[in-house]
Amino acid sequence: MNQFRNVQTWTRFGHLLRKQHIPAYPRHSFFCSRRTADEHFVPLKPLYRAASSRSTRILPSEPWIERLPSNARPYLYLTRIDKPIGTLLLFYPCAWSITMASYALQLPYTTPLTYISLFGIGALVMRGAGCTINDLWDRNLDKAVARTKDRPLARGDISTAQAVTFLGIQLAVGLGVLLQLNWYSILLGASSLSVVTIYPFMKRITHWPQAVLGLAFNWGALLGWSAVAGEVNWQVCVPLYAGGVCWTLVYDSIYAHQDKLDDVHAGIRSTALLFGAHSRPILSALSLSTISLITYAGCLNAHGAPFFVGIGLATAQLARILYQTDFDSRASCWRGFVGCGWAGFWIWMGALGDYISLISML
């Protein structure tokens, strides 16, 4: 019963790590008591870090940016490209508007496909530019917040001059995308830059920076329609835009709850601090406003059943998020923030389903 054998522990790549003694029970070892077996069992503890660099695949995955050249990493982290939820939140209002305009004008599928592709690229680039602007404003404040202290500018990985140069490149690429649109849309898109620029400053002077972010992040609800139609249908787009602003207040207030303890000491203001213990009922009211306003826009645009199915799924998603989110848990707030993005996705899927149903009958 007390026989032992040497076992060599190997990684999957063939690197010898250590030897360990474990009991070698005979075939009739099931007659042993459970206690005896437990006493003799010594669990193997894989020492993956001692293996070759290729064995890091076994460890928890590292950000894909870490596999790129070291001099490029700070710029990529600056754009938050490793966290695509921000790009999606900027993109969805554009997608709603493009799809709804294509539905209203009964345009061929090539039109929304072209503009959704352009706006997808634009959302990726301009979200990154917005992050760069934000971090330039907040490079000193970020040092006082646990979640943001390791951002490239706050940590000193890149200088302010380098960040400004990089911002110039981002804005040039964004301008290149904007110039693919009609002149009405070019002027409308350029006018949003003032809102994007002042947003980071708002958290220093008002508890409503999330509202200013909503004005910037939902500009695509206006711009998408003008890109497709050559002008904005204000009757439809104003409630669509207002609904998007309310949606932003919901998800960004949840996001702000992650940092509320640090924000108090850093002098940063937010709706998370303003709403406090009343966050759940207030955000529920804002969610109801979101759904009501976008539903109204759909009614004005004469949408059919698929659109309202998407609205129903979005409603259920927001209700689930507000029921489950623990506003005192950073992990729960992050899940809630990401989950709010799915509400925007379902609204788009409803509009897209309605558009596909329409063109299939033409």
Image: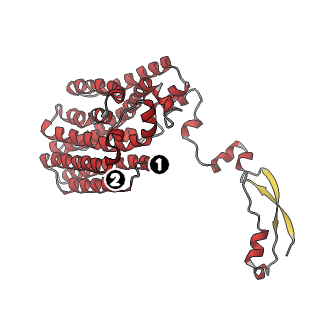
Residue at image location 24% in from the left, 33% down from the top = 223
Residue 282 picture location, percent across and down? 27, 47
Helix, strand or loop status at disc 2 = helix
Please say if 304 is above or below 258: below
Residue 54 lies in what quarter of the image?
top right
Q: Nearer the viewer, residue 290 or 77?
A: 290
Question: Residue tagged by mark 1?
Answer: 331
Please say if 120 is above or below 326: above
Q: Nearer the viewer, residue 105 or 221?
A: 221
Q: Nearer the viewer, residue 172 or 272?
A: 272
Residue at image location 81% in from the left, 69% down from the top = 23
Question: Residue tagged by mark 2?
Answer: 322
Give the number of the disc on residue 308: none
Earlier sequence position, callout 2 versus callout 1: 2
Query: Relative to residue 296, is residue 321 drawn left or right?
Result: right
Helix, strand or loop status at disc 1 = helix
Residue 159 visible in the shown view: yes
Residue 137 picture location, percent across and down? 41, 24
Residue 56 picture location, percent across and down? 66, 46
Alpha carbon of mark 2 to alpha carbon of mark 1: how far? Answer: 14 Å
Query: For mark 1, does the 10 Å Cα neighbourhood hold few (<14), some (14 to 19), or many (20 or more) residues?
Result: few
Q: Amino acid at mark 1?
A: Ala
